[in-house]
Image (cartoon, rainbow, N blue to C red):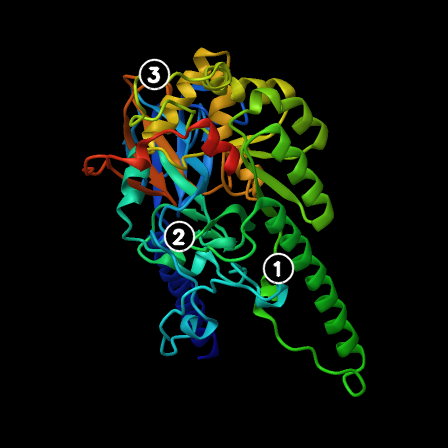
Amino acid sequence: MRKNLLAAFAAALLISAFLISAALAETVNWTAIRGARIVPVNGPVIEKGTVLIRNGIIAAVGAQVDVPASAWIVDGNGLTVYPGFIDALSSWGLPQTAQAQPPSAARGAQQQPQQPQQARSWGPLDRPGTFSWVKAADLLQPADPRLGQARNAGFTSAVVFPRQGIVAGHGAVINLGGRTAGEMVVAPDSGLFLALRPSGYTGFPSTPMGIMAYFRQLWLDAEHYRQALSMYAADPVNIPRPAYDRAIEGILGARRVLLPAADPVQLERMLTLAADLKTPAVLYGVVRGYEMAARLKQAGTPVILNVRWPARDRNADPEDRESLRELRIRDLAPASPAALSEAGVKWAVSSEGLDSPRAVLRALKQSIDRGLRREDALRALTLTAAEIYGVAARLGSIERGKIANLVLADGDLFDDRTRVRMVFIDGVRRLPEPEAPAPQGAAGRSPSISEEEEQ
């Protein structure tokens, strides 16, 4: 009798194990892109190979890959697979006129109407133009139509930052897919965005020198706040409890700061400022990188390059004569990527100000015509952007263990005739979507020289 019970028990265990394994097998989603040309970025090109995806992660890549019988096969013949492109400085997925919300709003409490920003500041404790507690990860809108336009151009990720005031808030690395905002977030804190041209703020300080002095004061206040908290924690009986300061809390949480550097003069100011703040910095803008590359290499500071090359204002009087200096900057700006690459500067790409995401590739094509290597342009769009923001273990190249963000195109990336046929984001295939006509006006206008220097 006992032997029969043991045998029955063993049989039940085997059946349970079989059912569990079968259930697990059903939850594993396999996709194989087979027979495609693969450009991993971090390794040699595979002329005909397979990318195997398991539950949104790259499981294998190579010329010879064992594909499970249950895998969904994507025919890659005639297609080239690239890592998904990354816009390194964007506002895709964020409200077009993002406003800072008080912490209670994030918790679902009744939202209070936004008060107008102060027209006048009585001192640094007013925290003018400061929204350091705002996080882009809390503002994401998956229905933003710009996400579809970006996917159509091959972008699968972006580093997005709020835009308000002079301390705009913390950015986030996001994937441009997902049904909810939470599913889009890859890294919730990619740095604190600082600006010298206040957005939506007209109070004091309003000059670059005043704003930089205010930044220094903020960081001094943050260090004082940190020390006060430490002293209180060590002796809460005798040391007064520091008053909570959400603006300073946001400063303390900054992993890096993004600082504008449009020209060599501003570059030196920002390098000095970064040293004073004692916070890792990433410089953005740098359209005149052709004359800043050597200094950037010496400083070891990474760059987010704005590829909206300077151009004559469409509304300018045709009778107006442009200076030789303006013509020279306009001519040399597209050579900046090649100069940065030759100097060994880490640089990635921003679509800020361009009329469409596809314009990024057109701008880089201009730089390729001016000496930029195609592999350097592709790396700036992918792996270098991931390295700058500390997510290279998950994004930026086609290798085992990384998120399956992929672009399938029907030719060379920088060929004008090449079209993106599909993208994969977190392993989910997305086909090209219908696009609305590109907006006309300021968004599509390239900056004048004077505008770039003011940034």
Residue marked by disc 1: 251
Spatial distance from mark 2 to mark 1, Cα to Cα?
25 Å
Q: Nearer the viewer, residue 358 or 418?
A: 358
Label count reads 3
Question: Which one is nearer the viewer's eye here, 140 or 202?
Answer: 202
Q: In this view, does 153 lie above or below 371?
A: below
Given residues 98 and 184, the one toward you in this image is 98
Secondary structure under the numbered disc 2 in the rendered image: helix
What's the mark number on residue 114?
none
Q: How crowded is mark 2: few (under 14 residues within 10 Å), some or many (20 or more)?
A: many
The amino acid marked with disc number 1 is Ile
Quickly name the residue at label 3: 415
Q: In this view, does 90 lie above or below 307?
A: below
Q: Earlier in the sequence, mark 2 or mark 1?
A: 2
Give the residue displayed 56% in from the left and 24% down from the top.
Answer: 289
**Residue tagged 2:** 184
- Residue 48's spot in the image, x, y percent? 39, 19
**Mark with earlier residue (3, 1):** 1
Q: Nearer the viewer, residue 307 or 206?
A: 206
Q: In which quarter of the image is residue 111?
A: bottom left
Give the mark toward the camera: 2 or 1: 1
Picture quadrant where residue 43 is located: top right
Q: In this view, does 147 lie to the left or right of 209?
A: left
Q: In this view, does 374 lie above or below 350?
A: above
Secondary structure of the residue carrying numbered label 1: helix
- Where does the N terminus fall, quadrant-wise? bottom left
Crowdedness of circle 3 by 10 Å Cα count: few (<14), some, many (20+)?
A: few
